[in-house]
Image (cartoon, rainbow, N blue to C red):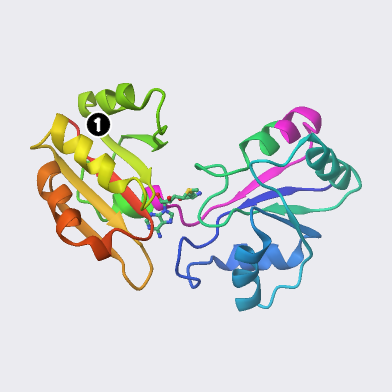
Amino acid sequence: MSTLYVIATPIGNLEDMTLRAIRILGEVDMILCEDTRMTKRVLNKYEINTPTLSYHTHSGLAKVEKIVAYLEDGKNVALVSDAGTPGISDPGVRLVSEIRHVLPDTPIVTIPGPSAVTAALSISGLPSSDFLFLGFLPHKKGRQTLFEEVVDSKRTVVLYESPHRIAKTLLTLSEIAPDRKVVVGRELTKIYEEVVSGTAIEVMKYFQDNHDHVRGEFVVMVEGK
Ligand code: SAM
């Protein structure tokens, strides 16, 4: 029977691949990639020559039907995203949901590994036995309401942020909860990995004073109230 494998890949450091992920990526008939060029970096490192097919947020129904046909044909398929775990603020949710619906007997198997949310929390020192993960905040509609949810939360809140919006997000946090503890994980597992912690005001000022650190990828964690 065909299987869909949902496989986590590194969030920066290419050595962060599990042995199982490497084996399965080499064994399947097709790898669905968010961006084939990004995934090729991992595949080349581990000398994996499996054919790839793009599957991303804008992939339409025709692509899903093609993947369904492939699975119906008895082929094994792996799904990866550019970094981390597919489906976590990344494409994959719709495909997995569709396969569960259309091919309920097809096993969907997780090959777990890195995800920025767990990587960042694990070194934050913030309470993390339970937490609220909000992913990327919306740019406009609903943004303010979500900020209120962030500062009202009794649990640690985790957000994903881009270099374009990190300064704005830290500014808003420092305005509505200036003394709240905030931890920012930047470029985790990469050369310029950095963790900045302090009150919302202190962390905001750090990035204001160190403009060259406003680049790369960010996880923002806010302590519960
Ligand atoms: N699926 C991925 C995961 O499991 O973490 C997340 C993909 S999401 C499109 C990309 C966001 O994750 C980035 O904007 C950043 O907020 C966060 N991220 C990914 N890699 C990171 C890293 N190495 N360091 C810090 N944050 C990272």
User: Mark 1: which amino acid?
Assistant: Arg
Name the outermost residue toward the right: 73
Residue in view at x 10 percent, y 49 percent: 202
Find disc 1 in the rendering and name its residue.
Answer: 155
Which one is in front, 209 or 45?
A: 209
Number of callouts in the render?
1
In the rendered image, which quarter is residue 24 located in?
Answer: bottom right
Quarter of the picture holding the C terminus: top left
Is 160 included in the stretch rendered in magenta?
no
Percent from the top left, x then y, of residue 157? 29, 36
In the rendered image, which quarter is residue 13 located in?
Answer: bottom left
Which one is in front, 224 or 111?
A: 224
Percent from the top left, x then y, of residue 33? 67, 55
SS label for mark 1: loop
Residue in view at x 52 percent, y 57 percent: 83
Is 108 included in the stretch rendered in magenta?
yes
Which region shows up in magenta?
Answer: 98-117
Residue in view at x 19 percent, y 62 percent: 210
